[in-house]
């Protein structure tokens, strides 16, 4: 006797409730957080959700769309509530940068697709608009505010990538070994700075973002005078 499968069953999660797009994206991001991007496939995602892999395609048409959805989820996780408009512009910029950094570090395994694909949806673009707006309010024209936002975002992503790349201890040992290998009399400035590099690492993010912010604000003042 031929038994026909119920197509509605394929679109239900393991607990019997209807499968939703948000549930799929959350499961995909959790899988990437736990095991990395290499573990992500429609088949594996179906297994995580307890459904036929074809059920995933009912909500998300292909792997590319799934990757875009993960980028959206990471960007949407940035905590915009920490922003306070009454603070000075430099502190507003730093606060926004910290929120971006914290979201990236919370989902470090997804960083490669965040870097390669970028935000493209309303939820993903809200943090971008916030930072651009802070720079506009500080006096930068639209094009320069957008460019400044990209500079700060690039700095945040670079710092996040450095922190997510591995443990600090091997890097410290590598730097110390490098310093010992320098030919006598060469690289005097690096010799001088290297002993303090890791003491500065924890506050280096704030130092760098504040320096960028002050430079951008100084540029805004210069443009206003010209």
Image (cartoon, rainbow, N blue to C red):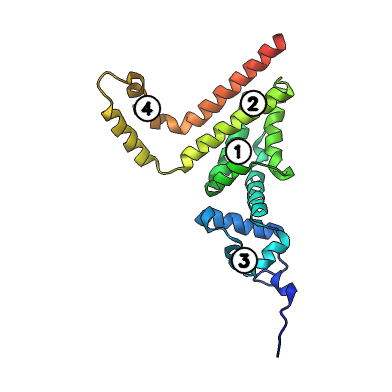
Say which label, 4 or 3, has the lower sequence index: 3
Q: Give the mark toward the camera: 3 or 1.
A: 3
Residue at screen point 72% across, 63% down: 58
Q: Residue 25 appears in which quarter of the rendering? A: bottom right
Q: Label 4 vs label 3: CA separation?
A: 49 Å
Q: Give the mark toward the camera: 4 or 2.
A: 2
Q: Are the two marked residues, 2 and 1, in contact with CB atoms closer than 8 angstroms?
A: no
Looking at the image, residue 75 sits to the left or right of residue 188; the answer is right
**Helix, strand or loop for disc 4:** helix
Residue at screen point 56% across, 27% down: 209
Specify the label residue 99 is tagged with. Answer: 1
Say which label, 3 or 1, has the lower sequence index: 3
| Residue annotated with mark 4 | 196
| Residue annotated with mark 2 | 148
| Mark 1 closeness class: few <14, some 14–19, many ≥20 residues within 10 Å | many
Specify the label residue 46 is tagged with. Answer: 3
Whether residue 157 is situated above or below residue 219 in the rendered picture = below
Residue 40: x and y in percent read 56, 58
Q: Quadrant of the image for the C terminus?
A: top right
* Residue 85 visible (yes or no): no
Say which label, 2 or 1, has the lower sequence index: 1
Residue 144: x and y in percent read 68, 23
Looking at the image, residue 130 sits to the left or right of residue 101; the answer is right
Q: Give the mark toward the camera: 4 or 3.
A: 3
Q: Label 3 vs label 2: CA separation?
A: 41 Å
| Mark 2 closeness class: few <14, some 14–19, many ≥20 residues within 10 Å | many
Residue in front for this viewpoint, 129 or 91: 129
Whether residue 204 is situated above or below residue 171 in the rendered picture = above
């Amino acid at each position: 006797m031929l038994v026909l499968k119920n197509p509605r069953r394929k679109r239900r999660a393991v607990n019997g409730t209807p499968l939703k797009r948000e549930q799929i994206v959350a499961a995909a991001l959790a899988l990437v957080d736990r095991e990395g991007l290499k573990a992500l496939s429609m088949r594996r995602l179906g297994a995580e959700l307890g459904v036929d892999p074809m059920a995933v395609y009912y909500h998300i048409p292909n792997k590319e769309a799934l990757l875009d959805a993960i980028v959206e989820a990471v960007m949407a996780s940035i905590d915009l509530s920490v922003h306070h408009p009454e603070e000075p512009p430099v502190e507003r910029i730093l606060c926004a940068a910290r929120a971006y950094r914290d979201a990236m570090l919370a989902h470090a395994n997804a960083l490669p697709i965040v870097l390669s694909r970028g935000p493209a949806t309303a939820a993903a673009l809200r943090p971008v608009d916030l930072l651009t707006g802070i720079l506009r309010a500080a006096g930068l024209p639209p094009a320069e505010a957008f460019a400044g936002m990209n500079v700060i975002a690039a700095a945040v992503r670079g710092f996040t990538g450095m922190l997510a790349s591995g443990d600090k201890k091997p890097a410290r040992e590598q730097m110390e070994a490098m310093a010992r290998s320098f030919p006598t009399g060469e690289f005097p400035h690096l010799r001088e700075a290297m002993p303090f590099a890791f003491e500065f690492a924890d506050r280096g993010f704030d130092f760098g973002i504040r320096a960028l912010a002050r430079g951008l604000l100084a540029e805004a003042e210069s443009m206003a005078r010209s």
